[in-house]
Amino acid sequence: MSKMNIVLFGPPGAGKGTQSKFLIERYGLAHLSTGDLLRAEIQAETPLGKQAQELMSAGELVPDEVVVGMIRNRLTTDTDAKGFIFDGFPRTKAQAEALDNMLGKLGSAINLMLSLEVEEEELVKRLLGRGTTSGRPDDQSEQVVRRRIKEYEAKTAPLKDYYAAQGKLRPIKGMGTIAEITGRLAAAIDA
Ligand code: B4P
């Protein structure tokens, strides 16, 4: 059976991490979240974590070579997976090209990009809401949250064109209850 690789895409607070949990269970895919991998490095106080911490707290992206290196490690060790959900990766064109390259060497490819579409004011509300309990420094201030959304618009959103050109983009309405959105994502995958 060929592998199924999905990019779960969207602005900060769109529900990528939230929805990944349901999709990995339903489809038996391995979860690769660069945000989670970076937070683990920060927790472990590694040199990489120290470098990432400052950028993440300011709402900026960490350098491409850092996240590409982390993904490469996982792709070459999780070789038994039925496929992957990429959550929060790629975030730049360089990352998308590196991903195509790495998967190509493994005889694999991205099948679908599911893009969660959510209005900006709803994103701000969700992230500041999470900030009251998550302890995540990047969810605490409205200024940083809006900075993250700006970074997304400038550097990440253009990737929709990259995947659309390959016929892989599926925009998904990301407003509504968590269960409604899971239903829409599953329908797009099953199709
Ligand atoms: P990430 O960890 O990817 O975090 P995120 O964009 O904030 O989205 P997340 O998946 O966590 O939130 P979700 O929408 O599920 O990135 C953090 C930082 O790491 C980046 O800013 C960057 O600095 C760095 N980074 C990560 N990857 C990188 C890369 N590839 N390149 C460079 N830098 C990188 O949920 C948000 C909230 O909404 C939750 O509280 C949730 O409960 C709530 N929610 C979800 N769905 C909802 C719904 N339907 N209704 C109401 N609330 C909902």
Image (cartoon, rainbow, N blue to C red):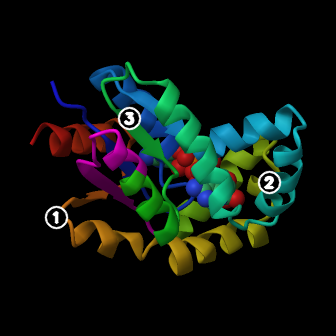
Dot placed on the residue nearer the N-terminal end, 3 or 1: 3
Q: Position of residue 191 (x, y in %)?
A: 9, 43
Dot placed on the residue nearer the N-terminal end, 2 or 3: 2
**Ligand 1 neighbours mark 2 (CB distance < 8 Å):** yes
- Residue plotted at (31% across, 38% down): 182
Question: Looking at numbered disc 2 in the image, what kind of residue is underneath it?
Answer: Ala
Q: Residue furthest left?
A: 191
User: Which region of the structure is painted magenta?
Assistant: 102-119
Q: Using the rendered view, name the quadrant where residue 79 is placed.
A: top left
Query: Which residue is disc 2 drawn over?
Result: 52
Q: Position of residue 60 (x, y in %)?
A: 72, 68
Query: Which residue is disc 3 drawn over?
Result: 84
Q: Are marks 3 and 1 in contact (CB under 8 Å)?
A: no
Structural distance between the alpha carbons of marks 2 and 3: 24 Å
Query: Which residue is disc 1 drawn over?
Result: 167
**Ligand 1 neighbours mark 3 (CB distance < 8 Å):** no
Q: Is residue 85 above or below residue 131?
A: above
188 or 92, nearer to the observer: 92
Dot placed on the residue nearer the N-terminal end, 1 or 2: 2
Q: Using the rendered view, name the quadrant where residue 80 is placed.
A: top left
Question: Looking at numbered disc 3 in the image, what kind of residue is underneath it?
Answer: Phe
- Residue plotted at (83% across, 40% down): 42
